[in-house]
Image: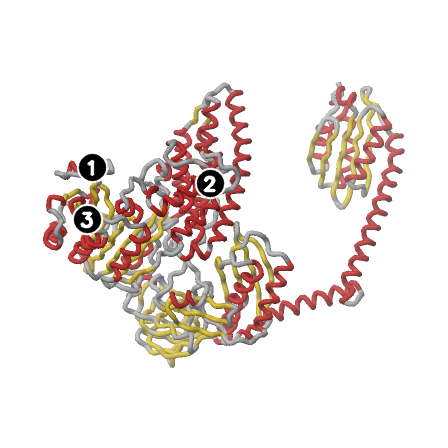
Amino acid sequence: MEKMGLNQIREAYLKFFEGKSHLRLPSFSLVPKNDKSLLLINAGMAPLKPYFTGLQTPPNKRIATCQKCVRTGDIENVGKTSRHATFFEMLGNFSFGDYFKNEIIPWAWEFVTEILQIPKDRLYVTIYLDDDEAYEIWTSKTDVNPKHIFRLGKEDNFWEHGIGPCGPCSEIHYYKDAGEIVSAEDFVEKSDSDRAVEFWNLVFTQFDKDEDGNYNRLAFPNIDTGMGLERMATIMQGADSIFEVDTIKSILDKVSQLCGVKYGEEKAKDVSLRIITDHARSVSFMISDGVLPANEGRGYVLRRLLRRAARHGKLLGIEGTFLYKIVDTVVENSGEAYPELKEKMEYIKKVISIEEERFSETIDAGMEILKGYIEEVDKNNKKILSGDKIFKLYDTYGFPIELTQEILEEKEIAIDIDGFNEEMKVQRERARAAREESTYMGTDVRILDTIPSEIETRFEGYKTLELKSKIKILIKDDEFVNSIEEGAKAIIVTEATPFYAEMGGQAGDKGIIFNDNFTAKVEDCKKNIGGKTVHIVEVINGSVSLDSEVTLQVDKTRRAKIANNHSATHLLHAALRTILGEHVHQSGSFVDDERLRFDFTHFTSVTEEELKKVEDLVNKEILQLHDVETQEMTLNEARESGAMALFDEKYGDKVRVVKMSDFSVELCGGTHTTNIGKIGLFKIVSESGIAAGIRRIEAVVGTKALELVDSKIKLLREASELLKCSEKDIIAKLNQQFSELKEKEREISTLKSKLASGAEDEILNNMQEIKGVKCAVGALKDIDGEALRNLGDKIKNKIGSGVVVLGSTSNGKVQFLAMATKDAVSRGIHCGNIVKEISAIAGGGGGGRPDMAQAGGKLPEKIDEAISAVEKVVEKLVR
């Protein structure tokens, strides 16, 4: 058996099945599409569910993939065992109602024994207990040793997931040791101890399990196989652990180099090295697919992995940020197979670096919180920290439980791990609820998603906005119907359509569908999960039946505006990359006839100067009046031409490349203007942040941009009229008025101080003595807070000993102030209590220290009554 690298195995597998008429598809994004049951793709078949259930028509009945996967269910075992990982690649070949056991079993044997050349005496096969058909094929169509075939029960060799498609499976295993496995019992024991390694699972989806538990035969059974690439590489390279496989070991070596720790010398440090290695792979792939750190959902998974890896870096003595430095090695080993890694390498590094820096701050904040918890435990003479506090540290502050445990052990404090686990269980239940219960497909199946796959809805809207076609489906009130009448809200599906269905951030077309007997207004146009175009309509008059011929007419004015906005987003994307840098990538967009919105990756707000440069560059390109060229080509041809692609999109054999000179070349299925000059003026309306590392620009073009400019001009005109100056003098005039306003404010403040000073003598002349404590009180008008405090200080200084209580009405509100000298406080005076009682009379409240307090009120007319009550309050307090 010749040693093969991980990348070689992947390529050999995909080429082998291409030779068996399979369509090789690139890996789907880790972010699931139309599947609420998953946060992240966790198996090779997960993105293909719609093909297995018939909700979508596959591009080929035979498909082969190598799928990126992330699983975190066993995260605590990562680094501690030889095979657990959060990121892995799953090789798979799939048949959708085409070939079955007769083909896949001999193909699997051929690939394993002839392509990989694994010795046959080391190979063992398991089948489902009752699957005589599989046994017959294995023994008649391959030369596997019949003594190496074992029948196992449902738990081991039957695949099912609740109700829906299911079936028996057959697994191929590699036995690491010399000698024979002689029985099923012996085999299970060897498997449990990892001496017999399962590496390929052939699932024969031949039943449909109903709600009553019956297994009904499928008319067109499917094949779904899965082979873990890393596990296969351990076999081919004679490695005992996935961390010894060539591509993964090179990452581990990089980690060892960064921390100056040699692998294999200390068990605890080896665990940390393996965790960092695995998590660095995971986060690199997740970020390349658009996942960003967050406190919930898949963003939380990413944050947890990043912080866990950073934490183990600190355990190994690494100072500062380091994880971003590993990305180069990840890309070096996987970039050829996954070009999105190369494309976004600098972006991935930036995201990781920012999150590492935040985690360093979190560690510091968490340490302070934990310090407080430890002091509380010591104070209460307990020797255990409660689970809810540990979980709060972990969940709210991102503080790793391992770090909490380590610090508490040093203080000889135990942790309530059961309480922590209970809190974790509650959180997981919340997460499951957030993912929503779903069908096998991963989303609730609507009636429009069950439109038969044989019905086509050809899109002809690139070349025409009006055509005749035949109605094939009518849906009303969530039911298929034969006709629809006037006033009905319904769905119409035709053989062909000029209407663009909402997709790729472009709003669906509107217009009318009509014939001599009826007219329907198309309010929206969308695609169902199977990719069929559906027209959402309201019947304005008449009625129509299935198979009627109708005319479909798009609102061409609205379409033209949408096309202009869409083309402008392409120009904006290119301009942002030119001005801000090539790390900028589209992260979402929306265009309709009113405006455009463009989300992109960037880590700081865009300055006014940068926005101006972007806007100017887009307008400069528009004035070049270039034609917009569209061309169909293969995906590889498109990439070679330099076309930008969204890597979380799944492109078919042929892609549409939209070119606006050499300035913008992108893959896009949307509708565009024929010449960029038709866009007209481009104006940015706003720029803002919508998530960590994601910015949003909203803009308008054409007549909407002119309307925006007109509104600004009108605003300037109105401002100049109010200021009684020309438009060019507005700023100078405003500066002059601001200066005058400040001068007036200073004058008012001076006058208020004089008013307050004038009241000073009156208050002092009316001062009383209550039980030996001097008490100066007064009610004033139009004195603000600062002037009131200044007056209070002056009076307190003049009386030398005692209490001052003042009230003032200003702008319809009441303010109270109380101040007392130290000796008055020693006699029982408490300013906080005084203002609390008197402010209640004026419909307010407040409080403060014994020596100084403030309060407010809502009833100015009650100020005299409140001030009059001071004497009784003070008398009550003095002792």
Q: Quadrant of the C terminus?
A: top right
Q: Position of residue 447 (x, y in %)?
A: 33, 61
Q: Amino acid at mark 2?
A: Leu
Residue 20 shows in this picture: yes
Q: Amino acid at mark 3?
A: Ser
Residue that carries the numbered disc 3 in the rendered image: 170
Callout in the foreground (1, 3) = 1
Q: Amino acid at mark 1?
A: Lys
Task: Name which of mark 2 and mark 3 comes first in the sequence.
Answer: 3
Residue that carries the numbered disc 2 in the rendered image: 258
Compared across the picture, whether 661 is left or right of 526 comes to: right
Task: State the image quarter where residue 237 is shown.
Answer: top left
Residue at 50% over, 18% down? 381
Q: Nearer the viewer, residue 869 or 602?
A: 602
Dot 1 crowding, Cα within 10 Å, few <14, some 14–19, many 20+: some
Q: Position of residue 159 (x, y in %)?
A: 23, 48
> In terms of secondary structure, where does tag 1 sit?
helix
Task: Name which of mark 1 and mark 3 comes first in the sequence.
Answer: 3
Q: Nearer the viewer, residue 332 or 155?
A: 332
Dot 3 crowding, Cα within 10 Å, few <14, some 14–19, many 20+: many
| Disc 1/disc 3 C-alpha distance (Å) | 18 Å
Task: Name which of mark 2 and mark 1 comes first in the sequence.
Answer: 1
Res 190 label: 1
Q: Position of residue 577 (x, y in %)?
A: 54, 61
Callout in the foreground (2, 1) = 2
Type of colouring: secondary structure
Residue at 38% over, 81% down? 516
> In terms of secondary structure, where does tag 2 sit?
helix
